[in-house]
Amino acid sequence: MKTHRVLVTGGNGFLGQNVCDQLRIQPWVQEVLAPRSSVCDLRDAQQVAALFRTTQPDVVIHLAATVGGIGANQQHPALFFRENMLMGMNTMHEAYANGIKKFVCIGTICAYPKHTPVPFREEELWNGYPEETNAPYGIAKKALLTMAQAYRQEYGWNAIYLLPVNLYGPGDNFDLETSHVIPALIRKFVEAKERGDASVTLWGDGSATREFLYVGDAASAIVRATERYDGGDPVNIGTGREITIQDLAALIASAAGFAGEIVWDSRKPNGQPRRCVDTKRATEAFGFTATTQLEAGIRTTVDWFQEQKGPLREVHFSKR
C-alpha cells in the first residue's frame, strides 16, 4: 500500500487502542485518526458526514461497536441491534460517498448460526439463525457484511469484512454486568481471593466451549488484512483452539491464586454450545497466525488486573 491517512472508529477503545498503536509503526501509514465519540456520534448520519469532510482519510477501519456479554445482550437486545446497525451503515456509506479507497469492517463470531459445525467455516455464516441470547447483535453485524458485498458488487468498492472470535487482554472491560467471559472471570476470582471467599458462582454448567484471541494478536490481524487483503469474502480471525468454560474458569482461578470452590448455576444460560473457527483463510489470504498462547495471555491479563491502580474500564448501557 502507498502512504495513507487511516481513520479508526472506536480507536480509543479496548481493541482500537491496540490497532492504532500497531498502525503508527507501519511504513504505509502517514497518520492515524481516532476521534472520540464525544467528537462524532456515529449513530448520527450528519455528524458522520461532517467527520469525513473534516478528516478526509484514505482508509477506514470500523471497530466502533456496542458490545457485551450474555447478560448485557439479554437486557439490551434492541439497543445492541439499533446502535450497531446505525454506526455501521452511517460509517460505511459515508466512506463510500467520500471516495475512501478501502473500508475494513469488523464483524463478530456471534454472527454464526447457533449449531454451526466446528470448526466454523466462513461458508457456514448463512446456514441458520444465531444463538438466541446474542442474535440481535450478531444479525446487526452480519448485515454489514451484506452491505459491504452489495457496495462491492454495485460500485466496485473495496470493503473487506473480518470475523474475530472473543477477545481478551489488558485494558478490557471488567464491569461484571457488561463484560465478556474472561474479564468477568478474572475480576470475580481476583476479588474473591482478596475477600477470602470460599466459593465463586458462575453462569451455566461450564460445558459450552469458546475460542479466545489475545487483543494484540487481533490488532495484528486487522492491520495485516488492511494492508494485504482485498477480497469480498469474510475472513475468520482466531487461534483455532477450543476450550470449555469449565476449563477456562479453572485456568483463570489458578492464575488468580483462588483455591476455593467453583459453583455452577445451571439456571443461567450457557450461550452458544460451541465456538471455534477455521483460520485457514486468514493464513492464506494475508499470512496471519496467532502467536499468543491462551495460558500466557491469561497470565498477562491477570497480572495487569492485579496491578491496576487507577479506575478500571467499565461500560454501562442505558436506553437512548
Image (cartoon, rainbow, N blue to C red):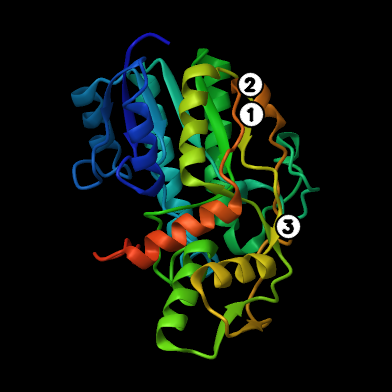
Which structural element holds mark 1?
helix
Tell me the amino acid under the disc marked 2: Ala
Most extreme residue toward the right, as rendered?
A: 117
Q: Find the distance from the CA under tag 1 to the CA under tag 2.
A: 5 Å
Q: Find the distance from the CA under tag 1 to the CA under tag 3.
A: 21 Å
Instruction: Please report contact status of discs 1 and 3: CB closer than 8 Å, yes or no.
Output: no
Relative to 155, say whether 16 is above or below.
below
Tell me the amino acid under the disc marked 1: Ala
Answer left or right for 237 relative to 310: right
Q: Disc 1 designates what residue?
A: 282
Q: Which quadrant is the N terminus positioned in?
A: top left
Q: Position of residue 107 (x, y in %)?
A: 54, 41
In the drawing, what numbered circle is on residue 285? 2
Q: Residues within 10 Å of mark 2 (few under 14, many from 20)?
A: some
Task: Report the front residue among 28 and 11.
Answer: 28
Instruction: Please report contact status of discs 1 and 2: CB closer than 8 Å, yes or no.
Output: yes
At 40% across and 15% down in the image, what residue appears? 101
Which structural element holds mark 3?
loop
Q: Position of residue 11 (x, y in %)?
A: 32, 40
> Tag 3 or tag 1, which sits nearer the N-term?
3
In the drawing, what numbered circle is on residue 153? none
Task: Report the front residue among 10 and 44.
Answer: 10
At 68% across and 67% down in the image, what residue appears? 247
Q: Disc 3 designates what residue?
A: 274
